[in-house]
Image (cartoon, helix red, strand yellow):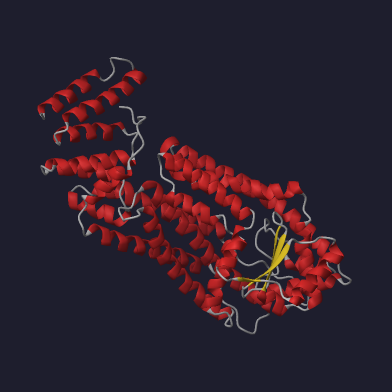
Amino acid sequence: MPRMLASADPSADALADAFAHLPTWLLPVHAIAVAAGGALVAWVALRIAARLSPPRPSDSAHWSERARAFWTEFRLPGLAFGLAVPMNIAIATVLTTSPLPGRDVTAVALAAIAAVVIYTRTSGRIRRAYLPSRTLADQFRTHVVLLFLLYPTLIPLLAGLALVPAHGRGVWVGAVAVVVALLAFAFGAGLAILRLLGLTAPPTLRLARLVATCTERTGVTPRGVTIVRAPFANAFAFPTTRRIAVTERALALLDDERLVTLLAHEAGHLSESRAMRLARIAPMLVLVPIALLRPLVAHGGLLWLGIAIAALLVVAVAVGGLARRLERRADTIASANTDDPARYASALEATYRDSLIPAVMPGRRAIHPHLYDRMIEAGMTPDFPRPEPPPWPIRRLAVVIIVLTLGAWLALVPGAAWVARTEVARHLAIAVRGATAGDLAALARHRTVAGDPGGALAFARGAVALAPRRLAYRIAEVHALAAAGHADAAHARLDDLAAWIDARYGNEAGADWRASIREAIDAQR
């Protein structure tokens, strides 16, 4: 029997009616389960990362050695969290639908909040061991600033996964919204949001004077300079808007000459050609298919998922190579526009030491050159031997998390459906991981057996709303309409099905089953 059938868009009212027929205890249990699931995912991911982290060095160790250990111990849980939590949220929003009011938005928020609480506790404990002067508020500000300045694309990406429906006009509205949001962040929306949050400040007289000095040396005039209220020392360039941002900690940590060299590096980014600026923006659009994963999978199957991920990986490799060349170019500009190139190396070392960033990074595809190499190229001999890169078992971490995630969802979706033979068991399955079209279709059958034609029709319509191309669910809806006393509507719906079958397989295809369904409908009159 054919699996797919072109049909009308699903109705939110049909889903709302189906969920209204669920028992009242299911919603609070589901809310608790979603939050507990988010916390469990984060906890498991962080435990895996802790197992793969190296031993912690003593407080008297050189900062470069402490940075090696801190980088792995602090960043690996962040990577595990950033991989496991969005992956589980994405799979959940694609495979299931939450019965909570607001549905997937509410479920995603509950899971994310619980996961962030667990991650914040773990990362805070690690941070206090290495950087005791950094408070919890400092950590929170760091996450917010980095999110909107370095990783703003995560916002439309996760919003698209959670909000864009599988069918209907909402798909096109969501696609346009995702593209607009990505372009907005490419043109400085992240900095504007930080301004609204009170995390920016206008430049001080000192900073304005140093920017003027930088402009005189490099010949690059930024359109604006902003101070970011962040506890780490760094500066950021926004080539598309030709703006520079400097953190409060960088202003406090660096003297004038070293800060000017840091500004010169950012000015080097502002001097990039228009083609390079476009090359920074264009790859962001590859994230659109990932954000629209639910409608892509609903209409094209898992093939589109593979295509989207493959395209993302190819673009990531290409963009990484370009970014590395642009960073080396900016380093050259910074060193060339100072009387003593060692000042730039000294500024870099100070910022790395302050945040315990390793002097030699793991892997071969780091965007920025290694600090140790940058210091030598700038003419400054480091006062410590070249350290080994931090242990970075990213492949093992990714494999373990992906295997565990896929295994868990294989157990939760088809496994739970196989175990949930009774109506109460099916309710529990929905409470644990949300509803699928198969769940609602099974509840429709249970309601039919229980002599509740109204409930059976509501669940049958809900199943069609979630999987409008499944012919079996459409046929079940026809039977439910007839059983509920809507014979004329059942005949009309059957005519729609018959027209599709005839157009695809010929006029004689399926004549027997159509006749048997018509007899069943007439028997309900």
Q: Is residue 141 above or below residue 13?
A: below
Q: Left or right of 517: which side holds 306?
A: right
Q: Does residue 426 appear in the picture of this structure?
A: no
> Whole-percent x and y of residue 31?
31, 61
Residue at the image position 70 percent from the left and 73 percent from the top: 351
Residue at the image position 56 percent from the left and 43 percent from the top: 310
The one nearer the camera, 178 or 94, is 178
Q: Is residue 248 above or below residue 471?
A: below
Q: Is residue 31 above or below residue 312?
A: below
Residue at the image position 57 percent from the left and 82 percent from the top: 132
Q: Is residue 17 above or below residue 351?
A: above
Marker count (numbered): 0
> Whole-percent x and y of residue 272?
77, 53
Question: Quadrant of the rendered structure where residue 232 is?
Answer: bottom right
Q: Left or right of 273: which side holds 84?
A: left
Question: Quadrant of the rendered structure where residue 55 is?
Answer: bottom right
> Whole-percent x and y of residue 11?
32, 41
Question: Quadrant of the rendered structure where residue 431 is?
Answer: bottom left
The one nearer the camera, 350 or 203, is 203
> Whole-percent x and y of residue 398?
51, 56
* Residue furthest out toward the right: 339
Residue at the image position 60 percent from the left and 58 percent from the top: 189
Q: Left or right of 365: which side holds 495?
A: left
Image quadrant in which the N terminus is located: top left
Q: Does residue 84 appear in the picture of this structure?
A: yes
Image quadrant in which the C terminus is located: top left
The one nearer the camera, 436 or 522, is 522
* Residue furthest out toward the bottom: 60
Q: Left or right of 463: which side holds 43?
A: right
